[in-house]
Amino acid sequence: MENEDYNIDVFETELLDAYFKFRSNLPMKDEETGLEYKKSFKTSQDIISELNCMGGVSYACVSDYMKSHGYVIATQPDGSVAWAIWERVHIIK
C-alpha cells in the first residue's frame, strides 16, 4: 500500500465533499446562473448508491456528514423520511 497512514474516513469525507459541491442544506441561488437551487429528498441509501461506483461510503459516515453540515431530515407524504437537499439547476439549451 502506497500510504499506510491513509484513513478510509478521509476518503469517504472527500467523496461526500465532492458530491455536495453543488448541493446545499438551505435554499440558495446559483452564483453563475442566478437560478434557485431545487429542493429534493434523498435517503442515506440514495447517497450511498450514487457514490458506490467511486468506492462507496458507509451509513454512519453519511449520517455524521449530513448532521455536521446542517442537513435535516424531512418526512415525506407517504411517511418515509429523507434528507432535505437543495441541488443546483442546470439550464438546458
Image (tube, rainbow, N blue to C red):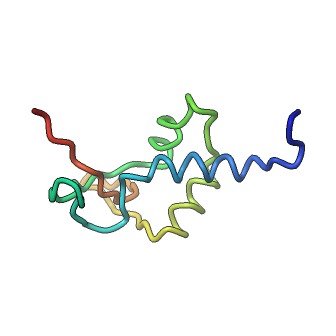
Q: Residue at x 56, y 53 (%)?
A: 62
Looking at the picture, how far across and down is residue 58, in whole percent?
64, 46
Rendering coords of residue 57 (x, y %)? 62, 43
Number of marks in picture: 0
Q: Can you name the residue that lies furthest to the front here?
A: 32
Q: Quadrant of the C terminus?
A: top left
Q: Up-down: is 47 above or below 74?
A: above
Residue visible at 37% across and 65% down? Answer: 25
Query: Which quarter of the rendering shows the N terminus?
Result: top right
Picture coordinates of residue 34 (x, y %)?
15, 59
Residue 64, above or below 6? below
Q: Is residue 23 left or right of residue 6?
A: left
Answer left or right for 2 relative to 70. right
Tell whether 18 sits left or right of 26: right
Q: Residue at x 56, y 59 (%)?
A: 63
Q: Where, by quadrant of the figure, is residue 61 drawn?
A: bottom right
Please tell me which residue is depicted at 17% across the width and 53% down the height of the picture.
33
For the residue pair 64 and 32, the one nearer the viewer reads as: 32
- Seen from the viewer's position, the closer of residues 2 and 38 is 2
Q: Quadrant of residue 81?
A: bottom left
Residue farthest top in this picture: 53
